[in-house]
Amino acid sequence: MLQLVLVVWVLSVLIFAWLRSLPGGPVSALLGDRGTAETRAQLTEALGLDDPIFVQYLRFVGRALTGDFGTSTGVSPGKPAMDLFMERFPATIELSIAAVLIALVTAIPLGYVAARRRGGWLDNTGIVGSMIGISIPIFFLAFLLKYLISIKLGLLPTGGRQSATIDATRVTGFFVLDGLLTREWDAAWDALRHLFLPALALASIPFAVIFRITRASVLDVMDEDYVRTARSKGLAGRVIRDRHILRNAMLPVVTTVGLQTGALLSGAVLTETVFAWQGIGQALAIGFERKDFPVLQVVIIAAAMAYVLVNLLVDLSYAVIDPRIRTAQKGS
Amino acid sequence: MASARATKIDRLAGLAVRSPDDQDPDGAGPDSGLSLAASAWRRLRRNPVFIVGAVVIGLFLILAVLAPLIAPHDPGLRLLEDQVSRARNEIPPAQPGHPMGGDQFGRDFFSRMLLGSQQTLMVAVLATVIGLGGGLVLGTLAGAFGGWVDTLVMRIVDVMLSIPSLLLAVSIGALFSQQTQFTVILAVAIVQIPIFARLLRGTMLGVRESDHVLAARALGVKGRSIVFRHILPNSLGPVIVQSTLVLAIAILDAAALSFLGLGAADDATPEWGQMLGNAQDFFDSQPHLAIWPAACIVVVALGFTLVGESMREALDPRQRR
């Protein structure tokens, strides 16, 4: 928790300094190019830019704590940046969770099999595939998927989160979950069809990393004495796999998933742009193009907090997976 | 508590310090008289992964250096403009003198691909050098002084590490009212500074405890000399490995940034990332305009990744899987 507070504090200082060093300063940042000399002078006074710098900083923090980050100027002009963020954040979470799920269900079994048949064709294909996966620009991969599957074959929608014709009830902001909760099956199915391709493109990064970590980690664990013991006791292969090898090999994998949060958010900016997915990544791309600094500010703060929080959760989940850590903490 | 990303960096940092029980598969153990670098090189030059990566990078380097000599035309001239038709989506096809045809403005595509290698490699190398330089300064400060300097530097580094790299790069890019190639280089470089700083500091902390530093200290060697002659040179291994991997990351990051509209290579200086981003609009009729730059980006990034990964393996034989 201390880490989170510290990160947010240093981040607030950095963002404050960032806002003040933007071209033209905060007045231009808020007004954009439309400000006249008169409105600029008014805003300078209204914002208290003639106050001492630490007073300005405290005011900035006070506003930020109440969720007031100013009004969007470019992405959807006139809307408070915080509202815009809250509306779009679930879309990005939905996309990221789907991407991680796709990566987990494909990379862990493949990594396991690759390790068991080390040097086999699957192993070599997997390694080459994961190397190419991290070397291909993700926006081009997303574009290729969209072009081949949506435009050429017409199998899936080309972009957006749900067809305009569907009148779905909003509950959580996660469109697939909403459809399931309200039993509007067609809405859920439609949202899922929209979700699949962007999630698949975004999954390429975590897939490559999780595959390689799983493989390396399974190779390590397979050499352990307790696996040999289990085998010589005559335990069934499935039991050894699930209880002895996989469970112990999962620790580094869990860490890696936490580490991928940052890469996922970076990748989401590009994937969301290609697929017109209305999440915070797209908001960041549009916000950058149209110089919408209030929106950029919220997205950056939120992304950093999300990153720290996810990694805090990862640390906590160690205790669930590895009983040794639980007892070690009780003992100390 | 450091973030998990920081922990991963620290793991690489541990590689510079050899523990006495390390077993080297080639028999070049700690007692064989070979230095860490020499035994790593012995393993490296026999690794096919390294050779493939090195050959790929070598070929592209030669191509980039010779590009102005090979390129048949000026990449900025719209020589085939009369063959371009926006309305009918027509782009000049391959013809004598223009082996790959023209691009959407009628410029010679083959020449642009060749000279694009220069720009792409330059962005990657400059970004890595700036990132490495900044990281060296910060990391050395933190690792050499310790105490509150260390705490301060590492706090800032941890915060920078918790901002997703592309978001950080974009916010740095936003600070410039004029977008140039230099903006891209700087944005990509600054993102790498905290990683290098953390890596170097971690390595230096390990090396500081090793026997030869203790011996130097016992001999009365001055503090500055210990840092610059004994600790720093022995801490560079992991940093060099990381630089190679960063070259690949920088190429991809630069491509992503130009896709988002950051940076503006002008007519005369083609860049693969930008060519790829622009060519997607014509993908239906002219897929080769996107596929060539994309393929080149993948191959070069892959080359640097292969070399970096095999160097990491060579430094850490236990990880050799």
Image (spheres, coloured by chain):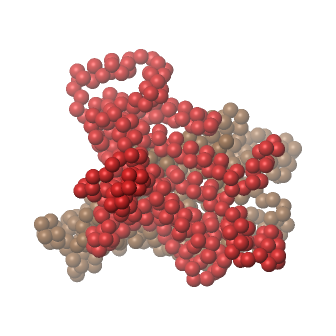
Chain colours: A red, B brown
Residue A305 or residue B115, whichever sits in front: A305
Q: At which x and y percent is residue A9?
A: 55, 32
Residue A237 or residue A182, whichever sits in front: A182
Residue A273 or residue A56, whichever sits in front: A273
Q: Quadrant of the C terminus of chain B?
A: bottom right
* Quadrant of the image occupied by residue B98: bottom left
* Quadrant of the image occupied by residue A83: top left
Q: Residue at x 65, y 64 (%)?
A: B312
Q: Is residue A33 above or below residue A151?
A: above
Residue A129 visible in rendering:
yes
Q: At which x and y percent is residue A142?
A: 38, 64
| Residue lying furthest front | A183
Q: Residue at x 22, y 81 (%)?
A: B96
From the viewer's perspective, tell me whether residue B272 is left or right of residue A217.
Answer: left
Q: Residue at x 81, y 51 (%)?
A: B210
Number of numbered discs on residues: 0
* Quadrant of the image occupied by residue A3: top right
Q: Quadrant of the N terminus of chain B?
A: top right
Q: At which x and y percent is residue B274?
A: 33, 59
| Residue lying furthest right | B218
Residue A19 or residue A316, whichever sits in front: A316
Q: Residue at x 46, y 71 (%)?
A: B299
From the viewer's perspective, tell me whether residue B241 is left or right of residue A21.
Answer: right
Q: Is residue A31 above or below residue A94?
A: above
Residue A135 visible in rendering:
no
Q: At which x and y percent is residue A284?
A: 37, 46
